[in-house]
Amino acid sequence: MSTVKQKQHVQSENKEVKRKASILDLSKYLEKSIRVKFAGGREAIGILKGYDPLLNLVLDDTIENIQDSNDPYKFVEDTRMLGLVVCRGTSIILISPTDGLESISNPFI
């Protein structure tokens, strides 16, 4: 193999390695409760059962927090049981564990 072909082969292998690296490692949250916020303001809490490289999530025992119809950024006390759901990764804004999460009042109001 010529030197040029060897360099191209090594460069193509390096590109493949870079593609396989993931930004988020959600494996530590499998079988644990997580909170997911979506574009548009929806919010759900469920147990992470699986995910893929595009961050599509499978949640079980999922509960959706209901938004106030007058203000999309406020939630009412009501919730809705969804059960097993698949969350599309392109619509997810935030993923956070519910363990150790503490809700605080807004200091800017």
Image: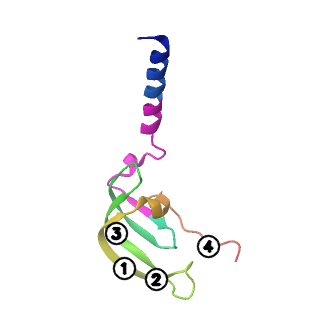
To which residue does mark 4 refer? 105
- Return the residue at label 1: 80
In the image, is 42 to the left or to the right of 51? right
Residue, x 57% and y 84% (percent of image)? 71
Q: Are marks 4 and 2 in contact (CB under 8 Å)?
A: no
- Of the image marks 1 and 4, the number of the one nearer the N terminus: 1
Q: CA distance from mark 1 to mark 3?
A: 9 Å
> Which callout, 3 or 4, points to the residue nearer the camera?
3
**Contact (Cβ within 8 Å) of mark 3 with mark 4:** no
C-alpha separation, residue under disc 2 versus residue under disc 3: 16 Å
Between discs 1 and 3, the one toward the N terminus: 3
Q: Residue at x 45, y 42 (%)?
A: 22
The residue that label 3 is drawn on is 62
Foreground of the two, 100 or 19: 19
In the rendered structure, which amino acid carries the disc numbered 1? Arg
Looking at the figure, which quarter contains the N terminus? top left
Task: Give the residue furthest to the right.
Answer: 108
As drawn, the label of residue 77 is 2
